[in-house]
Amino acid sequence: MLDGPAGSRRSAGGRAPTDDPPSPPDCPPGWRTGPPDFVGMGAQKAGTTWWFKLIEAHPGVHAVPDQRPELHFFDRYVEGWPEPADVERYHRFFPRPEGRLAGEKTPNYMACHWVPRMLREAAPETRPIVLLRDPIARYVSGRTHDDARMTRLHGDGRDAADDVRWVSDAFAKGLYAHQLDWLRAEFPAERTLVLQYERCVRDPAGQLARTYAFLGLPPHVPPAEELVRPRNVTRRDKLDLAPQRRELLVEAYRADVARLSAMVPDLDLSLWPDFG
């Protein structure tokens, strides 16, 4: 099992995290801990931080002060499986007063085939929330983010094999129908909310009302400046896709987008111009 406040030792179940997770917060007297009521599952670079903060703005949701919303709890299990003590530790990340909801969001969960089953076993009644973005725009934004991270970590000493893995991973994160298969194998469609980032940008109040209703929360209107706060702001030049590579990406994503449209009937493909 995990040992120490940061869980620095490998678990008997084979857990080998790349870095130590944070420590669970204290639970004040009279409050409760337990499985999260909702979990944001992704996709990366699809406005999940913005949307999670809007969810936390509801008075019926408790936001743990100074706790990062991205716990990266289950994506760390690249080996083994969470043991009961690990699951109990996960539950301690969600202290809340009676009558309030609590949750987390980790975009990487969506792209990890093992996470939906681990999450179901740890939180069978949770409600997954998924934001999807035009896969080409997501690819460009994700590559820009990852390239900056790789340069920061390795400088001019980047290995070509690492670049191949990063590019392949960036492409795979846009195969939404494939990932939604994993999620819906563990959570029924009626307990999973799939939102479209572009619709949230166009109609944040309407899509947020839909999100609150999905969570069983009464109507609430957060401050206007929160609804329209900057989303996916980057301070670096975005990846410039060669026309041939863009064309290839569109072709490679087309079948997955078509299947996604059948899985999510209200998906508005006119907002994804390469696939509309």
Image (cartoon, rainbow, N blue to C red):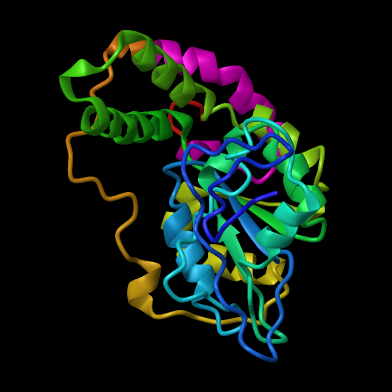
Q: Is residue 111 visible?
A: yes
Q: Residue at x 55, y 62 (%)?
A: 207
- At horizontal 62% and vertical 23% (from top left) the residue drawn is 256
Viewer-side residue, 155 vs 232: 155
The residue lying toward the viewer, choosing from 264 and 185, is 185
Along the viewing direction, whichever of 47 and 75 lies nearer the viewer:
75
Q: Position of residue 245 (x, y in %)?
A: 35, 11
Q: Does residue 211 show up magenta in the picture?
A: no
**Residue 216, horizontal then vertical, whole percent:** 73, 74
Q: Is residue 268 magenta?
A: yes
Q: Quadrant of residue 213?
A: bottom right
Image coordinates of residue 185 in percent, x first then y, are 82, 37
Q: Is 169 above or below relative to 201?
A: above
Question: For the point 73% across and 34% down, which residue is it?
Answer: 182
The quadrant holding residue 267 is: top right
Figure check: 220 above or below 184: below
* Left or right placement of residue 58 versus residue 30 in this view: left
Q: Would residue 251 be found to the left or right of residue 15 on screen?
A: left
Q: Position of residue 19 (x, y in %)?
A: 46, 43
Residue extending furthest bottom?
A: 30
Q: Is residue 205 visible?
A: no
Q: How many marks?
A: 0
Q: Which residues are magenta?
A: 246-271
Quadrant assignment, res 175: top right
Q: Main secondary structure of the magenta part?
A: helix
Quick check: 42 above or below 114?
below
Front-lying residue, 128 or 164: 164
Relative placement, left or right, of 154 versus 114 is left
